[in-house]
Image: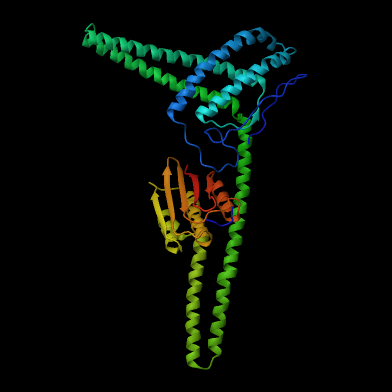
Amino acid sequence: MGETADDGSRGPRTPAGAGEPPAPRFPEPAGGSGAPASGESDAPAPQPPLPRRVAGLLLGCLTAPVGLLYFVLVGLPLGPLLLWPRTRPAALRWLGPGARALAAAEHRRRVVFFADRFPARRLPDHRLLRYLAARTCTGLVTGFVLLLLVFGAGLAALLAAGLLRGSVTWPQLLGQALLGAVLLFLNVQGLRSLAAHDARLARACFGPTEQEALRQRITQLATSRAAVLRAVDGERRRIERDLHDGVQQRLVALAMLLGRARRHREPARANELLRQAHQEAQDVLHELREVTWRVYPAVLDDLGLREALAGVCERSGVPVRVDYDVPGPLPAAVETAAYFVVSESVTNTTKHASASTVSVSVRRSGGTLVVRVRDDGTGGADPAGGGLSGLRDRVGALDGRLHVDSPSGGPTTITAQLPCA
């Protein structure tokens, strides 16, 4: 695999008003679970551990009273001015600094504790104010539910103490335990719903709007279509080069050997030339078979992806170990893309990586096929080079992702994620 091969947009601005300060720009953090930037090929970051998310939820309960205090002390006096168009710009100018500061704190909380990722964008003050109002209500309700949970834990402790003293009978204990279990279930479900609502509020504010998401999707589709055309043209050029430089030259050599055999008068020499011509014909058939495999392996349609990958292992000059765990059939386009990811990666390894072994893993995780090819070669593969960029175009045409990890000195790992839906 050592072959040298291969957004956030600005949001709407603050309403017009003389002397209004510029809207805040929220930077895009690295990694996370928010909307990925256009063209990203990295694998998604794992979800943060539960203790970290719980800490973020508790911190959100603490920031909600700060937002409430801000709306009481600043929002209530200036609120009526927002209703009149002539005074609205001035009111937003006075409310803006506090709203930006509180929104930046909430943005940071989502990034640090929930690993959210949002596109870098400039947000208008009125949008931040709406978010803060909803976020404050959600945080206060979450805090109230947590207090109910603590209160229930205290009642459970009192019930246990009464049982130890003998003042609570077993029927009373069973009844209280049943009621407590129901309330605990409702409490936990409420916390989960509030946490999900808090995440939706953050995405609605800091994430792209529906129009921006649609525009980004159109751009991705246009890029994907151009990538498909480039991949098709690249495949045609490679087929022509293989036929011209390989098969055609061998056929010329075969024709020359047969011509010399016809003209030669010594039977022994003529037989030797015919033997060479026969060997050349076999070599031509072998190379033609290789070319057809690189164009499209018929075994992929006849026997499926597993057998096609077995053929790649047989033809490879480097030992290849395949771990195939895909229950059920796959879409034909996904099978084809997975085959070429493995085939091209193994070919690049054989030619350029000086590797001794290659491991291939093909697994289905939910609605995604994950193909991972790893070698122990010298590394240094260029993701922007012709070969790997062609694979990226092929994978991107299916709305998939291709990630290349190839530090200098190795190892090289190529991971393709292909949607199966």
Is residue 331 visible in this depiction of the protein?
Answer: no
- The residue located at (46%, 26%) in the rendering is 53
**Where, by quadrant of the figure, is residue 234 drawn?**
bottom right
Instruction: Specify the quadrant of the image occupied by residue 71.
Output: top right
Q: Is residue 189 left or right of residue 258?
A: left
Count of numbered badges drawn on the protein: 0
Residue shown at 71% from the left, 16% from the top: 93
User: Measured from the top left, where is residue 183 in percent x and y?
Assistant: 36, 15
Toward the right, the furthest residue is 18
- The spot of residue 45 in percent (x, y) is 50, 37
Determine whether 168 is above or below 7 in the image.
Answer: above
Where does the image place residue 47, in percent across and percent down from the top left?
47, 33
In the picture provided, is 340 more to the left or to the right than 241? left
Which residue is more in the foreground, 180 or 246? Answer: 180
Is residue 313 shown to the viewer in this render?
Answer: yes
Residue shown at 55% from the left, 43% from the top:
41
Q: Toward the viewer: 68 or 337?
A: 68
